[in-house]
Image (tube, rainbow, N blue to C red):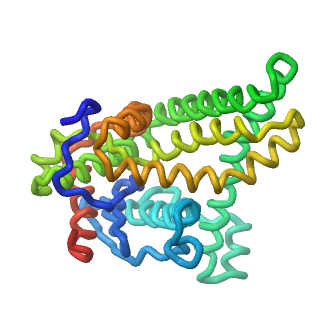
Amino acid sequence: MSNHNIEERVRPTSIGGQAIIEGVMMRGKKIYAMAVRNPAGEITVEKDDWSGIASKGIFKFPIFRGMAAFLDSLITGTKILMHSAEIAGEDWAEEELSPFEKFLQDKLGDKINDVLIYFSVGVSVILGMGLFFVLPVWLGSFFKTLIPVWGLGVIEGLLRIAIFLLYLFLISRMKEIKRVFQYHGAEHKTINCYESGKDLTVENVIPCTRLHKRCGTSFLLFVMIISMVVFFFVRTDTVVLRLVTRILLVPFIAGISYEVIRWAGRSDSKLVGAISYPGLCLQKITTAEPDASQIETAIAAMKGVLEDEGE
């Protein structure tokens, strides 16, 4: 065991995952497998190719591959999340269509799901930009007469992290989100169990830690910290210019953050342990201890990927 309660890895893997509605998605290099508890209490496992723009053209190279991976995860992750709700029999997945949705269905036919996915991703990106970039810039502008220009980036960064932490704390109070966080914990425990060289059984997974260095929560925290460093060097006291430069540099920052977390996931050095520590602490909010049935679901998703990719 390391200083940060992460199992020693004797069987490293690049497999990652995502908590979904009543289940877990595990992603390999080429395919993903999603395992969801249906209303009958049975585990439904579905697999599909992981397609996207990653590893194509310029997106094969460092920084750019991080930009592509982030976009692919948003689009495909949203698609999987919506489909998991259908399998789990969530009420909102079965609600009667509104007049606007019926209009879209008549006009778009089978393409409506793709349109709704891209629309959901677009709305999420806009809201994320507003909450974590526009709001900190606006709040930071009140300090421009009190501190030098170089300090505005630091103030914005601290405000951004504070907003992020408050956001996580508030959603963690929601009953539905608590259950998703349990599946998030099951995902991490299962990956840690596999990487520690143990057989994938509920008994072996239970004692494993629910924290993992390659978690998306850690990635978002890296984005917050790295943006603070980058914006320290992009100095302007004009609010509009600050806002424009912040938004334009988001893909670049996401690319850098991806490389950092990719490196952290492959190394067990003390430096990596120190860099990963804040993200691991944050995962204590975004993960929760799962029950045996949730662990079974995560194991089913993991085995689904291993059957095809055989790591």
Location of residue 32 (image quadrant): bottom left
Q: Closest to the observer: 3 or 80?
A: 3
* Residue at 51%, 62% in the rendered image: 73
Q: Closest to the observer: 58 or 305?
A: 58
Determine if residue 181 is in view.
yes
Relative vertical location of residue 253 with respect to residue 155 in this rendering, above or below? below
Q: In the figure, is residue 108 to the left or right of 80?
A: right
Q: Could you say where residue 305 lies in the image, as x and y percent from the top left? A: 27, 69
Q: Could you say where residue 54 lies in the image, as x and y percent from the top left? A: 51, 71
Image quarter (top left, top right, bottom left or bottom right) of the N terminus: top left
Q: In the figure, is residue 139 to the left or right of 209?
A: right
Q: In the figure, is residue 227 to the left or right of 41?
A: right
* Residue at 80%, 37% in the rendered image: 235
Location of residue 284 (image quadrant): top left
Q: Could you say where residue 191 lies in the image, as x and y percent from the top left? A: 26, 53
Q: Could you say where residue 214 lies in the image, as x and y percent from the top left? A: 38, 49
Query: Which residue is the extreme one toward the top?
Result: 146
Location of residue 310 (image quadrant): bottom left
Relative vertical location of residue 188 with respect to residue 281 in this rendering, above or below? below
Relative vertical location of residue 210 with respect to residue 84 in this rendering, above or below? above
Image quarter (top left, top right, bottom left or bottom right) of the C terminus: bottom left
* Residue at 70%, 47% in the rendered image: 129
